[in-house]
Image (spheres, grey):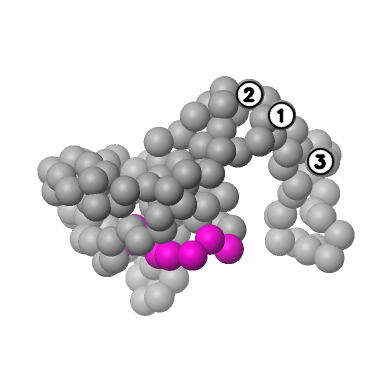
Amino acid sequence: QELVEAKYAFVLHTINPFTHDKDELYGELVAGRGETLVGNFPGRAMSFTMRRGGEPKLVSFLSKSVALHTQHCLIFRSDSNGEDLEGFAGAGLFESVCAEDDKGGHQRVHRMPVVTDRAYRQKLLKNIAETGWA
């Protein structure tokens, strides 16, 4: 599978996991690849909620200063037939290996447009949230 450079990565919950509200989406966003978000990297993702037909509401600003970036390359999955990793039955966890190593770097979070530019942030978060409603 082809892997391309990502400016941001995100995770969406189409039902808010904290309130269980089915009409409110909850999302988290980080700079770079999603491994920064789902891995054990220090700091907090930018988090937000959005009600159907509404505007994004910022819950927390981004404080993860590490971002992982990769060169344009291929990513290999350990199991193409859809079986889970041993010890993670039913979790849907699979091993992924990039042809090129990630390049870790420290972000100047206070200079990122998603932090400094409210209009940019609102548009980005709304576009991301709308993919969850689609």
- Amino acid type at image mark 3: Ser
**Main SS class of the magenta portion in the image:** loop
Would you place residue 86 above or below residue 35 in this image? below
Judge whether residue 74 can be spotted in this image.
Answer: yes
Residue placed farthest to the right in the image?
Answer: 86
Camera-side residue: 109 or 113?
Answer: 109
Of marks 3 and 1, the one in the foreground: 1
Q: Which residue was labeled with disc 3?
A: 78
Q: Are marks 1 and 2 in contact (CB under 8 Å)?
A: yes
Between the residue at mark 3 and the residue at mark 1, the CA separation in whole angstroms equals 13 Å
Residue nearer the viewer, 123 or 104: 104
- As shown in the figure, which amino acid type bears the numbered disc 2? Cys
Q: Does the stretch in magenta take in 44?
A: yes
Looking at the picture, how far across and down is residue 133, in whole percent? 36, 47
Q: Secondary structure at mark 3?
A: loop
> Amino acid under label 1?
Ala
Tell me where residue 113 appears, x and y as whole percent. 22, 42
Report which residue position mark 2 lands on.
73
Asked if the magenta segment contains residue 122, the reply would be no
55 vs 97, left or right, is left
Q: Which residues are magenta?
A: 40-47
Give the position of the N terminus as an image quadrant. Answer: top right
- Label 2 packing within 10 angstroms: few (<14), some (14-19), many (20+): some
Q: Is disc 1 placed on a helix, strand or loop?
A: loop
Q: Which residue sits at x=63%, y=23%?
A: 73
Please state, as top left, top right, bottom left or bottom right, where the C terminus lies in the image.
top left
Give me the residue at 56% from left, 57% from top: 38
Q: Quadrant of residue 57?
A: bottom left
Please name the residue that numbered disc 1 is placed on: 99
